[in-house]
Amino acid sequence: MKKLILCAICALCATATMQAKDKYDNPDTIVVSRDGTGQFRNISEAIEVCRAFMEYHKVIYIKKGTYKEKLIIPQWLTNIELCGEDRDNTIITWDDHANILLPSTGKGMGTFRTYTLKIQGSSITLKNLTVENNAARLGQAVALHTEGDRLTFVNCRFLGHQDTIYTGNAKTRLFFSNCYIEGTTDFIFGPSTAWFENCDILCKANSYITAASTPKDATYGYIFNKCRITAAPGVEKVFLGRPWRDYGYTLFMHCQLPREILPEGWHHWREEAKQTARYMEYDNYGEGAATKGRVNWSRQLTKKEAQAITLERVFSISDTWTPDYVR
């Protein structure tokens, strides 16, 4: 009899544990709020309760507020959407920079540890959020660091100085729609295939917007379509990009380019990169769009070539993924 009672108690405990464990294993929205009116006060806590490799879409709704958190969405999380209540007033912020000394080594932490938000998982969406690296201009300081595939960013702001957005894995696909991005030097950089649609990009220093490191065997790298480039007061000399590695790929098409874009448009970084860099433009407008002074190792696409560059074709790397938020 005692044995039966003990088994029953164990079964009840196991059931209670399973229920507690599975409390958030469903497609219901999780609410995060600094004022305590949601299930969690911190975004990291909401991420922690999401189940690995979810087949359903899980929304983490983040109420207005400033969340000082250094966040990782790990590789085993998929189909998560981080949705802010208000783009300009739902802010994820941190302030690491590359020259902060690590106690363990006495050396600077380096660029790739400075992120505010690192996304390692795939099929992740960010919507109506601000992600910033609030460090002073003391070195590289990444706001968004991506490693996953099929990442979508809608109506988000990415704020920083040098190296604001690092697209960290080759042949991963990123889609930025109606976003605002600002920075000083190389503030969109890395090897991923990324499409920027109808985005506003602010250059805060005399420097370079992009630093693509597209691999040789990747057909596409960075594509800016119908974007608007602007410059902060006092900025006078801006390059569209320079190749961080050989075969860097960057295309601006149907974009507004201001007078602060230098006539040559592009910089080679290293002399040998002139032979491999894939730098292109098509049908841009504005005072900085004049093609007469462009470097002779960049290209102006023909209408036929430009028409062949579609979102569907660019993202047909390993499957036929098309972002849900294409407009």
Image (cartoon, rainbow, N blue to C red):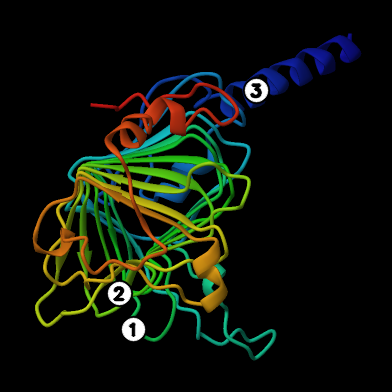
- Mark 2 or mark 1, whichever is nearer to me: 2
6 to 318, vertically: above or below = above
Mark seen at residue 137: 1
Instruction: Find out whether the residues at labels 1 and 3 contact each other: C-beta distance under 8 Å.
Output: no
- Mark 3 or mark 2, whichever is nearer to me: 2
Q: Horizontal and vertical percent for residue 280?
A: 36, 52
Kind of residue indicated by mark 1 = Arg
Q: Which residue ends up furthest to the bottom in the rendered image?
A: 106
Instruction: Find out whether the residues at labels 2 and 1 contact each other: C-beta distance under 8 Å.
Output: yes
320 to 136, vertically: above or below = above
Kind of residue indicated by mark 3 = Met
- Residue wearing tag 3: 18
Residue at horizontal 65%, vertical 26%? 17
- Residue wearing tag 2: 184
Question: Disc 1 or 3, which lies upstream in sequence?
Answer: 3
- The local secondary structure at tag 3 comes to helix
115 to 83, vertically: above or below = below
Q: Horizontal and vertical percent for residue 259?
A: 11, 69
Q: Horizontal and vertical percent for residue 181?
A: 26, 58
Cα–Cα gap, marks 2 and 1? 9 Å
